[in-house]
Amino acid sequence: MNKNFDSALENAFDKEFSWLDAFENPYASYKFSSQFESSMNTIIPKAEFTYVSIGKRRIRKTLLAALVALLAILITGCAFGVYYLVEWNEVQNDKQGTLDITFDITGEPSSDSNTSVVPKTPAGYTITEQFDDDSSCIIVYSDAQQNQIIYSRSNDIENMSVSIDNEDAIFKETIINGYKGYTSSKEGVHALYWVDSTYFYELQGTCDIDVLFTMAESMVN
């Protein structure tokens, strides 16, 4: 999310909905049906307990996403396309020095996936190699000093197994284009990894990591 959107959302919670702080909830003792509980457990992975701060409140990222979608529907009168919900299954492999990852998905395919969208070529670089088909894409960007940035995209994430080298690396969870991902920096090589509703993406190179983030953000429709 960009800073303007973050600020707008924070103002909405702190000002427009400040009355909620003193609101006596008449449904505090309400018990949801077992069918509803089961549906919610499917929609929101139990393993995801990451919280974000919105103003003075801390809420789950999955709830934040739902609130944003609801606000968009109320404001525009339109619903988004239905998205895959992706659950990351992560296991630290100390023997190999990797984070080993598989993915579980629920829901229907998103309607806005666009395989033609690729990162914008950064200043000073040109595309020197490119491979692209229905299942994957690899693009190599090179500058005059033969520094390279490599972009890759792969689908079929439900059957994919990924191992990310995180031994002796600066390795952090992050949000890329609104999706969960990781950043990695090791021996002068920086990388971004993330999954949207359809694809697994990787950007890596010896450039500044901000260049990689700018490239990733250029892919948003």
Image (tube, rainbow, N blue to C red):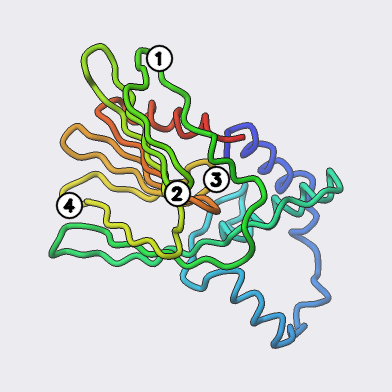
Alpha-carbon distance for marks 2 and 4? 29 Å
Tell me the residue that label 1 is attached to. 123
Tell me the residue that label 3 is attached to. 178
Q: Mark 3 vs mark 2: which is more N-terminal? A: 2
Residue 193, percent across and down?
Answer: 38, 46
Q: Going by the image, does 40 lie left or right of 24?
A: left
Alpha-carbon distance for marks 2 and 1? 28 Å
Bin the neighbour count of mark 1 within 10 Å (Cα to Cα): few under 14, some 14-19, many 20 and up: few
Q: Mark 1 vs mark 4: which is more N-terminal? A: 1
From this view, report whether residue 154 is shown above or below residue 158: above
Alpha-carbon distance for marks 3 and 4? 26 Å
Tell me the residue that label 4 is attached to. 167
* Type of the residue with mark 1: Ala
* Type of the residue with mark 4: Glu
Alpha-carbon distance for marks 1 and 3? 25 Å
Q: Going by the image, does 178 lie left or right of 81?
A: left
From this view, report whether residue 18 is shown above or below residue 203: below
| Helix, strand or loop for disc 4 | loop
Residue 191, percent across and down?
Answer: 31, 39
Q: Mark 1 vs mark 3: which is more N-terminal? A: 1
Quarter of the image that includes the N terminus: top right
